[in-house]
Amino acid sequence: MTYLLISFQLLCTLSFLASGSYQRIIGQNINTFLSQPSASRCICEVVETLNHPTIISKYIKFPQNAEERLALKERFYEKFKIPGVIGCVDGTFVTIVRPTENEERYYCRKGNHARKPTKWSVVASR
């Protein structure tokens, strides 16, 4: 168990998830006073908490039947005017290990190697 304020643990985790780096959490903020092992424990504890079945069942919802899918399609169309879609996921940079071939293709503006997954949509069958 990490003995830090929950708000500090959450901020540490959000910083890690945004940057993909423990060093940025520690190195860019001289007022952090947080070791890499402590940062790692914070991240593990927050992620484990967010992965708890109670949290998942309360905040992550998937349509369970045709009626729910139809309702989502209608709401998505009303808001964005795109037919047949029940949801979408925005792409983001995902940090990867430096590739041995064509390394320059994967170097991103954040100063590390990453890939940007293609945006995709969940399209309901008609």
Image: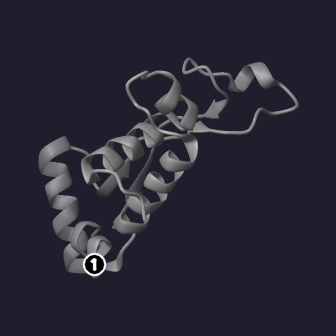
- Residue at figure coordinates x 43%, y 65% from the top left: 1
In the image, residue 123 lies at what x, y percent? 38, 59
In the image, residue 72 lies at what x, y percent? 20, 63
Residue 97 in view here: yes
33 up-or-down from 13: above or below: above
Q: Amino acid at mark 1?
A: Thr
Name the element at disc 1: helix
- Residue at figure coordinates x 27%, y 51% from the top left: 5
Q: Which residue is mark 1?
A: 54
User: Residue furthest toward the bottom?
Assistant: 65
- Name the foreground residue: 29 vs 77: 29
- Residue at figure coordinates x 54%, y 38% from the top left: 20
87 up-or-down from 55: above or below: above
Residue 11 appears left or right of 72: right
User: Residue furthest toward the right?
Assistant: 100
In the image, residue 28 lies at what x, y percent? 47, 21
Which quadrant holds the C terminus? bottom left
- Residue at figure coordinates x 50%, y 31% from the top left: 26
